[in-house]
Image (spheres, grey):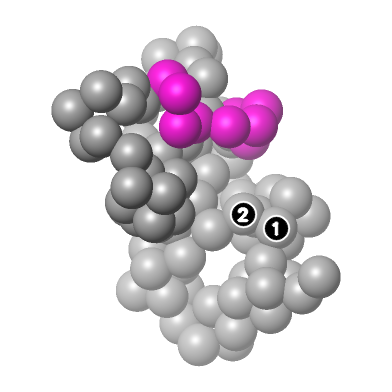
């Protein structure tokens, strides 16, 4: 796994720079070290990982197999306002 690629990455790194969308490969756009949690990680630890690393999405592994992604929106739906607010604040703080 090289990284995570979002729609924002495509807009900022391809469209805003007027690159040829046909010629750009996903591997060229993914950056950084992937931050992951294991499938058995509890919700509090997932929120902590997102806050510490200031990321909006964290990949979920079962061993070394990618099985999903937890995003801020998932936190909002599953855990409610207090937890969501804490994660949003931590991720957005410089």
Q: Tell me the residue at 52%/20% (across/down).
A: 2
Q: Tell me the residue at 67%/67% (across/down).
A: 91
Q: Which residue is mark 2?
A: 55
Nearest the viewer among 50 and 79 is 50
Q: In terms of secondary structure, where does tag 2 sit?
A: loop
| Spot occupied by residue 87 in the image (x, y as percentages of width and height) | 63, 71
| Spot occupied by residue 94 in the image (x, y as percentages of width and height) | 81, 70
Q: Is residue 33 left or right of residue 70?
A: right
Q: What secondary structure predominates along the stretch shown in magenta?
A: loop
Tell me if label 2 and label 1 are in contact, CB under 8 Å.
yes
Q: Which residue is mark 1?
A: 54
| Spot occupied by residue 34 in the image (x, y as percentages of width and height) | 60, 30
Q: Tell me the residue at 60%/84% (across/down).
A: 85
Nearest the viewer among 25 and 23 is 23
Q: Which residues are magenta?
A: 27-35
Q: Tell me the residue at 70%/58% (across/down).
A: 54
For residue 56, what is the image quadrant? bottom right
Magenta span contains residue 30:
yes
Residue situated furthest left in the rendering? 22
Q: CA distance from mark 2 to mark 1?
A: 4 Å
- Tag count in the figure? 2
66 over 91 or under it: above or below: above
């Amino acid at each position: 796994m090289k990284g995570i690629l979002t729609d924002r990455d495509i807009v900022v790194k391809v469209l805003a720079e007027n690159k040829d969308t046909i010629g750009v490969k996903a591997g060229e756009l993914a950056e950084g070290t992937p931050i992951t949690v294991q499938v058995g990680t509890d919700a509090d630890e997932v929120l902590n990982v997102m806050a510490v690393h200031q990321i909006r999405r964290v990949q979920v592994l079962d061993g070394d197999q990618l099985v999903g992604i937890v995003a801020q929106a998932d936190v909002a739906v599953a855990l409610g306002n207090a937890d969501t607010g804490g994660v949003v604040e931590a991720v957005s703080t410089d």
